Image (cartoon, grey):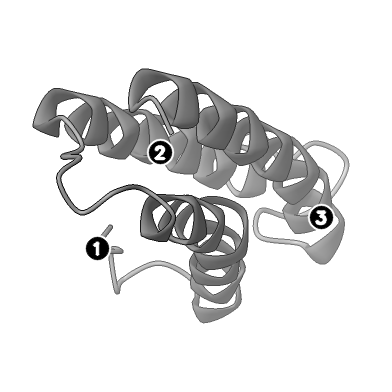
Amino acid sequence: IKLDKTKNAVYQDYVQKAVKTLLKDPLVSKAMLLPASKTIPDDCLNAMVDEAREHENKFYAAFTYDCQGHIPTAFPCLEKGAATYYENLKALEKTTEKCCNM
């Protein structure tokens, strides 16, 4: 998943680490256990990427536009948005695992 480099660097760091630790690493480790003859459907992976982007967009909105009680991009808004984002990525990992029959 490519990130928009114009967005806040701290925000990008949160997104990169979350995608790696909550989505990519768990799925890759499960995929490595599959038989070599097993292929993972492209439509399943494409749906995962699309949904991950949607969650990332919601996280960015919570961090910037919907930041209430603080200036946009304030750390409390980053943390609040990150908590929801992390939960969404964990759920997406489980959904993708089922979709790909891992």
Residue situated in front as seen by the camera: 86 or 7: 86
Residue 47 drawn at (x, y percent) = 25, 25
Q: Residues within 10 Å of mark 2 (few under 14, many from 20)?
A: many
Q: Which mark is residue 15?
A: none
Q: Is residue 62 above or below residue 7?
A: above
**Figure quadrant of the N terminus:** bottom left
Residue 30 drawn at (x, y percent) = 49, 51
The quarter of the displayed image where residue 78 is located: bottom right
How far separated are the C-alphas under marks 2 and 3? 18 Å
Query: Badge 3 is on which residue?
Result: 79
Residue 32 drawn at (x, y percent) = 39, 60
The quarter of the displayed image where residue 66 is located: top right
Q: Amino acid at mark 3?
A: Glu
Q: Which residue occupies 16% across, 39% down?
A: 39
Q: Is residue 71 above or below residue 95?
A: below
Q: Which residue occupies 87% across, 56% down?
A: 76
How far separated are the C-alphas under marks 1 and 2? 11 Å
Query: Badge 1 is on which residue?
Result: 2
Q: Earlier in the sequence, mark 1 or mark 2?
A: 1
Q: Secondary structure at mark 2?
A: helix
Query: Badge 2 is on which residue?
Result: 52
Q: Earlier in the sequence, mark 3 or mark 1?
A: 1
